Image (cartoon, rainbow, N blue to C red):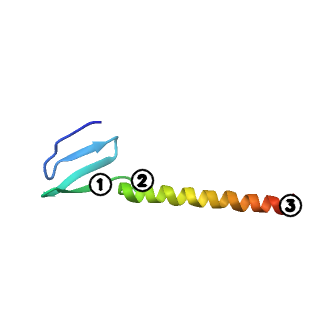
Amino acid sequence: MLILTRKSDESVILGDDIIVKVLGVRGDQVSLGFSAPPEMSINRKEIYEAILASNKEAAEKTNESLDALRGLFS
């Protein structure tokens, strides 16, 4: 893990086209700004994990539906 110290208005560049800028620090909260290509999604970790869980649940339901259809034609 790379650990960096940044102050307000300082940035970090990821790859060639992603910029993370420290917008401000208040107490134990840090405000970050992200500049990235529009095709790249940026989510908080808890939202990303919820999306993965939802996708997994949808895939399982699709498999159940396919199994049920196969049973009709067997």
Mark 1, residue position: 34
Position of residue 64 measured from the top left corner of the image (x, y, whole percent): 69, 59
The residue tagged with tag 2: helix, strand or loop? loop
Question: Which tag, 2 or 1, sits closer to the chain's start?
Answer: 1
Q: Is residue 42 above or below residue 6?
A: below
Q: What element carries label 3?
A: loop
**Quadrant in which the C terminus is drawn:** bottom right
Task: Report the side of 1 relative to 70 (left or right).
Answer: left
Q: Of label 2 and label 3, which has the lower sequence position? A: 2
Viewport quadrant of the N terminus:
top left
Q: Where is residue 48 in the image (x, y as percent from the top left)?
A: 42, 56
Check disc 2 and give the amino acid type: Met
x 28%, y 43%: residue: 13
Question: Mark 3 Cα within 10 Å, few/some/many (few <14, many 20+)?
Answer: few
Spatial CA distance of label 2 from label 1 is 11 Å
Q: Which amino acid type is marked by label 3?
A: Phe
- Total labels: the figure holds 3
The residue under label 2 is: 40
At mark 1, the secondary structure is strand
Pointer 3 or 1: first along the chain: 1
- Whole-Å distance between the Cαs marked 3 and 1? 51 Å
For disc 3, the marked residue is 73
